[in-house]
Amino acid sequence: MNNPKNIATELAIAALDAQSPMTSSLVDAYKSAGFTLALVGGPVRDAILGRLGSDLDFTTNARPNDSSKILKKWADAVWETGAAFGTIAAKKGDHTIEITTYRSESYDPTSRKPDVDFGNSIQGDLARRDFTVNAMALELTGDKPEFIDLFNGVEDLAKKVLRTPGSPEDSFSDDPLRMMRAARFMSQLDFTVAPEVILAMTKMSDRLSIISAERIREEFIKILMSPNPHLGLVLLVETGLAELFLPELPKLKLEIDEHHHHKDVYEHTLTVLDQAIALESRLGGPDLVIRLAALMHDIGKPRTRELIPGGGVSFHHHEVVGAKMTKKRLKELRFDGDTIEAVSSLVFLHLRFHGYGSGGWTDSAVRRYIRDAGQLLEHLHVLTRADCTTRNKRKAEQLSATYDSLEERITTLKAQEELDQIRPDLDGGQIMEILGIKPGPIVGEAYSYLLELRLDRGPLGIDTAKAELLGWARDKKLM
């Protein structure tokens, strides 16, 4: 009977042949030049799991300049930006590959950048990998493919457990970002993390402070955009890593006493994230903005928490405070401006629906809801629905029905009044012509006045808008 490594070899070769037949010509190119080439790391793991994609990683004894020469003859495009770290990237057809010279790398205790030394042995290269399930290789330039698994990665893959090839302390000392990668693989692959790895992450969490905000952001995004970010986020909180880059999340674990009851904000937040992900089909698929907004929507609560005499807790204006905190945190993590504005806007707006009560909003209020959400209206729909985590079935059904009615009113008003582009009945040029004025602040004031009328009363028509404008100008003593 085949042993697990033989089965893994067959699965990996079959996946590579089926998904990336062009690999054979790449292997021939390296072999002809006298170099080795092995599929390595995540693609080997994914090939065994039946989820091999079009991004492939290889390792070789060829130095970067040699790889560059080979790839320039073989690929459609070549990038040498990672050459200093031993990596040459290339694209052929719809496949992207990275080929890295055997290497070992480590961090100086105070440095954010790894020191890279090239090696001559694939065994040494695999020993420096982050986890055993990523420390497997398929050597392709021998007489037949050879599956290399020095650290029992196949066994850990079968058990769905994350362990390090050597001691986790040495691994995380070399590259502290690997601690976040444990959370990422947990979320992506539904793996558990070995106890000794969790212990090392907890003891060494402060080491994450030497990693740049940009690298932390990219790993955080990968966790958040995984199939089950809930798992990884809990690990980050429990090991103390979240304190280093997202302290607002563990701070949601507010103390609850017998006299001042309130919902567990931390667990509520993770549930909102889960429920937002379940509704993402409304947004066309996985969406970073909605996931960030779900995670951050209540971060203003710890700062606004007030105990109510006689029992209970209030969090007045936590959406305002939370929006400011969100903007600050995402800036520190070097997110782009558009993402920061979108997420902070959703945090600011996430309570707006609760003023709707049992459905008694005026058309004016609905128009303002649409105007304030702007292009984020569908995101706000998702966030608002996800924010209902009550276990009271009757209350949940009532909230859902009320929001259904709001969406129906929005659809009706948008169809009647073209609310996607709410603007006054008169534009700036018409305002200047009617009032006989030149461009200046008065035009903007008049425009804002007419816009408010438009939101309050709906379309006015040119004649009514002109009469209102003239009345406004007379009140302002402009004529």
Image: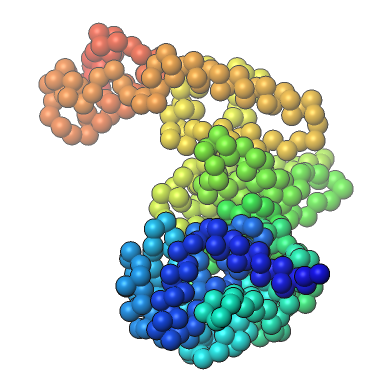
Q: Nearer the viewer, residue 107 or 394?
A: 107
* Colour pattern: rainbow
- Identified at 72% across, 23% down, the residue is 398
**Left or right of residue 126, residue 341 in this image:** left
**Left or right of residue 453, residue 107 in this image:** right
Figure check: 264 above or below 73: above
Q: Nearer the viewer, residue 170 or 417?
A: 170
Residue 474 screen position, x and y as percent: 23, 16
- Identified at 62% across, 43% down, the residue is 277
Q: Quadrant of residue 15?
A: bottom right
Quarter of the image containing the N terminus? bottom right
- Identified at 37% across, 83% down, the residue is 66
Q: Nearer the viewer, residue 53 or 314?
A: 53
- Identified at 28% across, 13% down, the residue is 465
Residue 2 screen position, x and y as percent: 77, 70
Residue 95 screen position, x and y as percent: 44, 60
Figure check: 326 above or below 319: below
**Left or right of residue 219, residue 132 in this image:** right
Quarter of the image containing the C terminus? top left
Residue 163 screen position, x and y as percent: 72, 74
Q: Nearer the viewer, residue 97 or 457?
A: 97
